[in-house]
Structure formats: C-alpha cells, structure tokens
Amino acid sequence: MNDLKHAIKQLIVDACDKDCDPASITDDEILFGPEAPLALDSLDALQLSMAIQKKYGLRLTDSKETRRILSSVSNLAEQLDAFIASRP
C-alpha cells in the first residue's frame, strides 16, 4: 500500500503540475480547497481523474463519490487498491 500511495503522490504532482516533492504530501491531508496545503481546484480534479483513468483504468463518474475519493491520498489509495484487486 505504501508503494501505491507514493505512486499516487507522484501522479498528483505530475498531473496537477505542482512544484513540490511528492514525499511532502501526507497521506491524510486534504487535497482540495484554499485551506489545503496543495490548494488543488476543480481543474486539478479533472486532470487527476483523467490521469488515474489513464494509468489505472479506474473511471470516476459520480461527482459526490469522486469528491470523497479524491479528498486525500489515503482515500484514493483505498479505492485504487480495491479496484485493482477486483480486476481479473
């Protein structure tokens, strides 16, 4: 799971074009909004969800569920881990 979380952090930095060390992102910090350390916005959410779909094949279509999944690295890692485990 730690490898997956590290890969997600790198994906966030790359997809959202952030100039920071992926290791500086904590697993449970809020990712979106002006009070979040990265201050990701709706365009970042779109870019991140497209990058997730391209890399892992997971489509995030329900806006409420997407908001919950993308709220932190931990939430995203749990969702991706379950998705990867469910694939044949």
Image: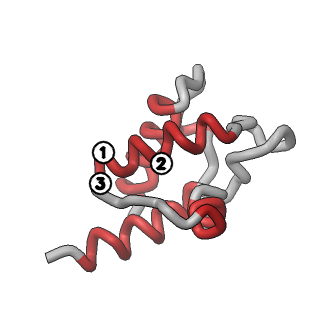
The residue pinned by badge 1 equals 54
Q: What is the C-alpha distance between the residues marked 2 and 1? A: 9 Å
User: 26 above or below 39?
Assistant: below
Q: Under tag 1, what secondary structure?
A: helix
User: 44 above or below 78?
Assistant: above
Badge number at residue 23 = none
| Dot placed on the residue nearer the N-terminal end, 2 or 1 | 2
The residue pinned by badge 3 equals 56
Pointers 3 and 1 in contact (C-beta within 8 Å): yes
Pointer 1 local density, CA inside 10 Å: few below 14, some 14–19, many at least 20: few
Q: Amino acid at mark 3?
A: Tyr
Pointers 2 and 3 in contact (C-beta within 8 Å): no
Q: Quadrant of the C terminus?
A: bottom left
Query: What's the residue at 47%, 48% (across, down)?
Result: 49
Left or right of 60 in this view: 67: right
Query: What's the residue at 39%, 41% (across, down)?
Result: 51
Q: Nearer the viewer, residue 51 or 61?
A: 61
Badge number at residue 49 = 2
Pointer 3 local density, CA inside 10 Å: few below 14, some 14–19, many at least 20: few
Q: What is the C-alpha distance between the residues marked 2 and 3? A: 10 Å
Residue 4 x/y as whole percent: 38, 56
Residue 83 x/y as whole percent: 34, 71
Q: Under tag 3, what secondary structure?
A: helix
Q: Amino acid at mark 1?
A: Lys
Q: Under tag 2, what secondary structure?
A: helix
User: 85 above or below 57?
Assistant: below
